[in-house]
Amino acid sequence: MRTTVTLDPDTHAIVRRLMRQRGVSFKQALNDAIRAGGQGREPQRAAVTRPRDMGTPLVDLTHALRLDVEPEDDERVRRMAAGR
């Protein structure tokens, strides 16, 4: 919904600060602030996950997913054979 809002200088500064901190648009920062205020809490900063180089694996991970899935597959085969 589109509407016109007149912000006080202090609330405008809050929205601008949220924009800088989160790297979001004015609209998103304003909506986040209103949602947080309506729930009686401060707006929370979005979590940022940064990738890290963990180096060369110490074990061969080529078949790691297969090792995880095989027990589930065995259970499915057992259930199908039992007629369930």
Image (tube, rainbow, N blue to C red):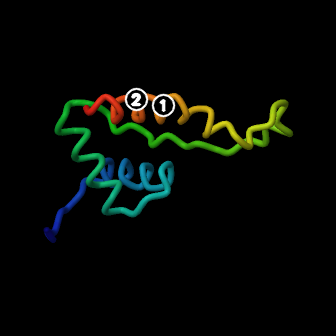
Quarter of the image where one finds residue 35: top left
Q: What residue does disc 1 label?
A: 74
Instruction: Please rate how many residues cluster around mark 1, counting C-alpha atoms within 10 Å: few if below 14, some from 14 to 19, many from 20.
Output: few
Q: Is residue 5 left or right of residue 57?
A: left
- In the image, 12 versus 74, the foreground residue is 74
Q: CA distance from mark 1 to mark 2?
A: 6 Å
* Image disc number at residue 17: none
Q: Residue at the spot x=43%, y=28% of the render?
A: 75
Q: Quadrant of the N terminus?
A: bottom left
Q: Amino acid at mark 2?
A: Arg
* Circles 1, 2 touching at the beta carbon (< 8 Å): yes
- In the image, 41 versus 69, the foreground residue is 69
Disc 2 element: helix
Q: Amino acid at mark 1?
A: Asp
Q: Is residue 11 left or right of residue 50?
A: left
Disc 1 element: helix
Q: Residue at the spot x=57%, y=32% of the render?
A: 68
Q: Residue at the spot x=44%, y=40% of the render?
A: 45
Q: Is residue 1 left or right of residue 29?
A: left
Residue 49 percent location from the top left of the image: 58, 42
62 over 27 or under it: above or below: above
36 over 8 or under it: above or below: above
- In the image, 37 versus 61, the foreground residue is 61
Q: Is residue 46 left or right of residue 49?
A: left
Residue 11 percent location from the top left of the image: 30, 49
Residue 41 percent location from the top left of the image: 27, 31
- In the image, 47 versus 13, the foreground residue is 47
Residue 66 percent location from the top left of the image: 61, 39
Q: What residue does disc 2 label?
A: 78
